[in-house]
Image: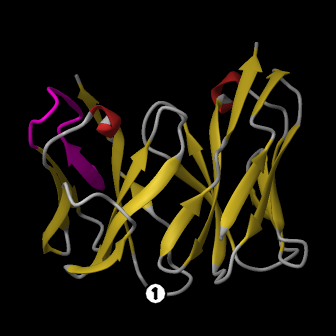
Amino acid sequence: EDKVVQSPLSLVVHEGDTVTLNCSYEVTNFRSLLWYKQEKKAPTFLFMLTSSGIEKKSGRLSSILDKKELFSILNITATQTGDSAIYLCAYFGNEKLTFGTGTRLTIIP
Amino acid sequence: DTAVSQTPKYLVTQMGNDKSIKCEQNLGHDTMYWYKQDSKKFLKIMFSYNNKELIINETVPNRFSPKSPDKAHLNLHINSLELGDSAVYFCASSYRTAGANVLTFGAGSRLTVL
């Protein structure tokens, strides 16, 4: 059965720290891996990764995919309180996005 | 302009009632989805439609019936509501073509069944 596993389930750090969120997957028909951020309402798109080893970057956030080892990481440097959210990893395959359980990140001022 | 809009945002109803949630997207996408998010924040797909055609029906009870009158709208009707239906329901849309499968989500509709 296809699955996406995220770790840690929750993480509490101080403002300014750097965090790494992990996502591993086992899928039969992989097309792409996506990261979303969910605060109070809708998940909002961060990155889509399709190729191994190519880092995607947006400000303090970056992500990379390893298709051989079947995992992805999301890095956030110099964290701010506005980074507090649930970070969702998902793969697109078989016509749908399948999500992991998410990592709840809390940034303490 | 809201890209994916859902109504209502909140719905509180009694067990056994029937209710509907509406969704509209103005992004020109050809595929729309319904996802359910439970109390543990786990997002699970329920249905997807491409150009009004049902593509995915993910072992959802028959009490749930999606309807897509055109590719910009996907509504969800729920009959005989049960306590376990309480959740946040998210509508989303995307293109179906490879490499363009970024889903854009609506703000969610929180359903509470008493």
Q: Is residue B74 visible?
A: no
Q: Is residue B90 above or below residue A97?
A: above
Count of picture labels:
1
The answer for which chain carries disc 1 is: B
Q: Quadrant of the C terminus of chain B?
A: top left
Horizontal and vertical percent position of residue B51: 23, 82
SS at circle 1: loop
- Is residue A18 shown left or right of residue B10? right
Please name the residue shown 78% across and 44% down the image. A60
Name which quarter of the figure residue B59 lies in: bottom left
Name which quarter of the figure residue B113 lies in: top left
Q: Amino acid at mark 1?
A: Thr
Horizontal and vertical percent position of residue A2: 65, 70
Question: Dot 1: within a 10 Å radius of its alpha carbon, few (fewer than 14), some, or many (20 or more) residues?
Answer: few
Please name the residue shown 19% across and 69% down the image. B72
Name which quarter of the figure residue A80 lies in: top right
Horizontal and vertical percent position of residue B55: 33, 80
Q: Is residue A86 visible?
A: yes
Please name the residue shown 51% across and 78% down the image. B100
Horizontal and vertical percent position of residue A51: 77, 80
Q: Is residue A101 magenta?
A: no
Magenta-tinted stretch: B1-18
- Is residue A19 shown left or right of residue B2? right
Which residue lies most toward the bottom here?
B97
Q: Is residue B54 above or below residue B2?
A: below
From the viewer's side, name the closer residue of B7 and B60: B60
From the viewer's side, name the closer residue of A15 and A12: A12
Q: Is residue A14 above or below residue B108?
A: above
Q: Which residue is mark 1?
A: B97
